[in-house]
Image: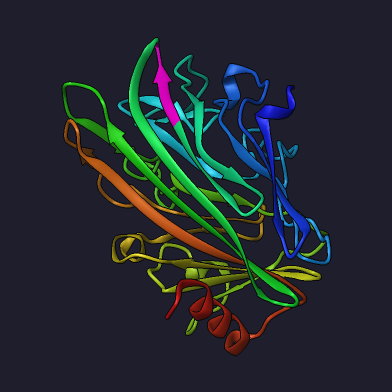
Amino acid sequence: MAPSDTLVLRVAGRPVARYVTRPELPARLSPRPYLHPVTTLAGTAATELSPADHTHHLGVGVAVPDVEGHNFWGGRTFVRDRGPAELGNHGTQRHIAFQLRDPGGFVSELRWVAAGTELLRERRTVAATELTASAWALDFTFALTNVTPGELSIGSPATNGRPGAAYGGFFWRARKEDRAPDVFTADRAGESEVHGTRANWLALAGAGWTLVFAGATEETRRDPWFVRAAEYPGVGSSLAHTERLTVAPGDSVVRRIVTVVADGRLDRQEAAALAGKAVGR
């Protein structure tokens, strides 16, 4: 892989994330750019790449299991009245160019292509900023524009008949440890309590790290959180929770999530304070 295909993000002079634009991956994994490894300021890893339990989980990025029936998530496709199935319907997110790139962040253009046709054009804006001596924030915005002449429909396994599986959108695969991480919001705790809820912020706390995810726009805050802790640690936003999301020709879907990456285990008060600082509230 050429050096121009990767970018290292730095905070206070320390490397905290590596962005891979053109990974060499099999079609079944829905090849796409991703951030991995992402670390705390002390160097503790907070992401996983292609873990054994879900080889299509690729660090931090954007993944959608159903765009007009095309799989941009990777792995099997959930089919109504049939269940998970191996289908040759995987799409690819192709990095085209950087409009801006420096150690503090980047702006890039991507094309979402399936079956030889470009469906979506994405503008991705990512920035890394210092919050405290032990915490920094990854500010991640994506804008998906329908470049086809007709409507595009975005779905999830949940909208296709699998309750509780409304994944699709921004997704962060965290590091799996011997003990499942704690997960909590301002007023709820535990995977079953926070999964599918709408909360201004949500925290995932591991052995020596805490991630605090915050929706930074009104539209993003309306998306329920997709949360896994016991089976594997992962957090994302749900573009299609109970209903499919329709995008008209030329229209865009824009979401912005800011994630606090902190050393140590934060409590509710600390998580709330850092989430507010990260999104300017």
Q: Which residue occupies the foreground of this view, 183 or 11?
A: 11
Query: Residue at point 39% right, 35% down?
Result: 122
Q: Position of residue 212 (x, y in %)?
A: 58, 70
Q: Specify the quadrant that holds the C terminus.
A: bottom left
Query: Residue at point 30% right, 26% down?
Result: 68
**Residue 116 located left or right of residue 211:** left
**Residue 67 located left or right of residue 5:** left
Q: Specify the quadrant that holds the N terminus.
A: top right
- Image: magenta residue range: 110-115
Can you see residue 154? yes
Can you see residue 83? no
Query: Residue at point 47% right, 48% down?
Result: 125
Residue 127, picture quadrant: bottom right
Q: Position of residue 235 (x, y in %)?
A: 55, 57
The stretch drawn in magenta includes residue 114: yes
Count all numbered tags in the image, as a single digit: 0
Q: Which residue occupies the foreground of this view, 109 or 177?
A: 109
Residue 264, picture quadrant: bottom right
Classify 137 as above or below 166: below
The stretch drawn in magenta includes residue 56: no
Q: Position of residue 142 (x, y in %)?
A: 41, 46
**Main secondary structure of the magenta stretch:** strand
Residue 152, picture quadrant: top left
Q: Which residue occupies the foreground of this view, 120 or 89?
A: 120
**Residue 46 located left or right of residue 105:** right
Classify 86 as above or below 138: above
